[in-house]
Amino acid sequence: MSDEEQPEWLKTLEKTPLTSRLRRKESLKRFNTWRIGGDADCLIDVVNVADLSFLLSFISNYRIPWFILGKGSNLLIPDTSWPGIILHLSGEFKSWEPLEKNNSTHKINTVSVGAALADVTFAQRCVTHGWKGMEFLIGIPGTIGGAVAMNAGAHGGEIVDFLQEAEWMDMDGNLHISARESLDFRYRFCELNGNYGRIITRAVFQLQESDPETVENKLLECQQFRMEKQPYNQPSCGSVFKNPPGEFAAHLIEDSGLKGKKQGGAQISPIHANFIVNLGDASSADILALIDTVRETVFSKHSIYLEPEVQILQSSVYG
Ligand SMILES: Cc1cc2nc3c(=O)[nH]c(=O)nc-3n(C[C@H](O)[C@H](O)[C@H](O)COP(=O)(O)OP(=O)(O)OC[C@H]3O[C@@H](n4cnc5c(N)ncnc54)[C@H](O)[C@@H]3O)c2cc1C
């Protein structure tokens, strides 16, 4: 894109002094676990609250298409160029700060965690402290921001079970702190999500005391489960569809005869039918075609419309 073709907002942004790094024409393949997708016109590694506040009000003022991603582990990115701004939290958003509190009867282990910290790092630090509960995060390759936004869960636990409060920013760049009780959390849903103009910056969790060895054993158990039951060594987004009430999406897909089905470079995993894996050169279109096939086939066989859990960076597709 020549200088003359650049939108006005981009020219202004490039001249604005920010601590955060602005990248032009960045491939988004490195920013999602399916390893697919086109370029972003502008991707910003946002390193502090001041820059985030400026950027969100800038985006609102210029009405720029935008999206916030964590590790892109639940995200389908289109093959075409993304014409706006992708926000990627980094720097001070990777914070970890234990806040020990005592009430009259017992010690409460409270920790404040930045939204960009990896779930896996969080789970491992909890082992060192002997804090139990978050072992399930070892198999979830996202960030704390993404885990709260998606209410991530596994092995009977969900992130909301441990959350005390979340700090988030609105599209005018103002920070808020919300107690868990005041927030709408459901199965793989939280009202704090970039999709609704709310960016999670930090979360505070309360964790139960145990000992490092017990916590580590539980964590290894969770890891072992993944290695046995899921295609852990192939690019995917985890479960593509939510489980409908009283059913498992994987069972419905398998029962519809779709396990192993291929489309271009994508395949419904022969190991776990709710996973679509990239065999090497899958496009976003291949994956969308398999998603459509699954929904249509499962509906015709079971009269159930599977709802995608995966977020699609192209709100018009299922919006
Ligand atoms: C191998 C594998 C296994 C998985 N297993 C599980 C599992 O067991 N359980 C489970 O629940 N999920 C699982 N997932 C899915 C995924 O890891 C989770 O949904 C994760 O929480 C997404 O985090 P992320 O940082 O990658 O978010 P992204 O995929 O980058 O984004 C997901 C959504 O969250 C929003 N978002 C991200 N960060 C923020 C923020 N700071 N503020 C506001 N909104 C934000 C995005 O806009 C988007 O709508 C798995 C994925 C893979 C690849």
Image (cartoon, rainbow, N blue to C red):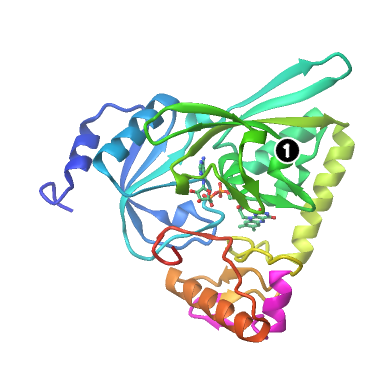
Is 252 contained in the magenta span? yes
Residue toward you, 156 or 181 = 181
Q: Position of residue 246 (x, y in %)?
A: 76, 67
Q: Residue furthest front?
A: 182
Q: Is residue 169 magenta?
A: no
Magenta range: 248-266
**What's the residue at 67%, 78% (across, down)?**
253
Disc 1 packing (10 Å; few <14; some 14–19; many ≥20): many
Above or below residue 293? Residue 26 is above
Name the image quarter holding residue 170: top left
Q: Is residue 109 above or below residue 274?
A: above
Residue at the location (75% across, 41% down)? Answer: 134
Q: Quadrant of residue 121?
A: top right
Indicate if the residue with disc 1 has its beta carbon within 8 Å of ligand 1: no
**Foreground: 7 or 63?**
63
Specify the quadrant that holds the C terminus: bottom left
Which percent across, then down, holds residue 126?
75, 33
Residue 146 appears anywhere in the view = yes
The answer to whether residue 194 is left or right of residue 100 is left
Which residue is nearer to you in this view: 243 or 31? 243
What's the residue type where badge 1 is placed?
A: Gln
Q: Position of residue 145 (x, y in %)?
A: 56, 40
Q: Is residue 272 visible?
A: no
User: Quick one: SS at disc 1?
Assistant: helix
Q: Residue under label 1, please give it.
A: 124
Answer left or right for 273 relative to 51. Answer: right
Q: Residue at x 61, y 43 (%)?
A: 184
Give coordinates of residue 143: x percent, y percent: 58, 43
